[in-house]
Image (cartoon, rainbow, N blue to C red):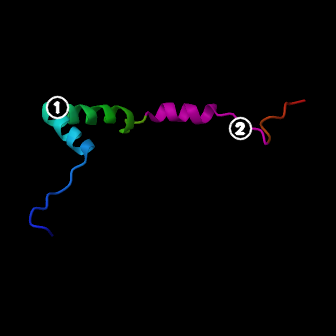
Amino acid sequence: MPLFWKPYKSDVTQFLDSLKQRDPQMEERQRQGRALLWDRQPQDAEAQRAVREGRVPQQPYVYQTKA
C-alpha cells in the first residue's frame, strides 16, 4: 500500500454523503415511505375468506368462448 494512499469515493457517493449532511432527516423519511409500500399490514381474516369464496374457477383455455 502506498504511503499517500487515500480510499476512493466515487462522485455519486460524495454527492449522497453531502446530501445526507445537508438534510439529516432524509433517511428517516425514506424509511417511512418504504414502510408505506413494503411493510406488511395486519390482515383481515374475514376479508380474506370473502375473497377466497368469491373466486371463480378459470376455464382450461381462457380465450375460448362458451358455446
Name the foreground residue: 11 vs 42.
11
- In the rendered image, residue 53 lying in the magenta stretch gets the answer yes
Task: From the top left corner, tell me how far across and down residue 51 is, in percent.
Answer: 57, 32
| Relative side of 51 to 42, left or right | right
The residue under the point 24% across, 31% down is 29
Residue 17 lies, with reference to residue 7, above or below; the image says above
Front: mark 2 or 1: 1
Could you say which disc has been placed on residue 63 in the image? none
Task: From the top left corner, tell me how far across and down residue 19 is, in percent.
Answer: 19, 34
Residue 52 occupies quadrant? top right
The residue under the point 17% across, 37% down is 18
The residue under the point 73% across, 38% down is 58
Q: Earlier in the sequence, mark 2 or mark 1?
A: 1
Location of mark 1 (residue): 25
Residue 2 occupies quadrant? bottom left
Check the image and name the residue furthest to the bottom.
1
Tell me, yes or no, whether the two marked residues, 2 and 1, touch with CB atoms within 8 Å: no
Location of mark 2 (residue): 57
Q: Quadrant of the C terminus?
A: top right
Per the image, label 1 sits on a secondary structure element best described as loop
Name the foreground residue: 16 vs 37.
16
Please give the range of residues in magenta: 44-60
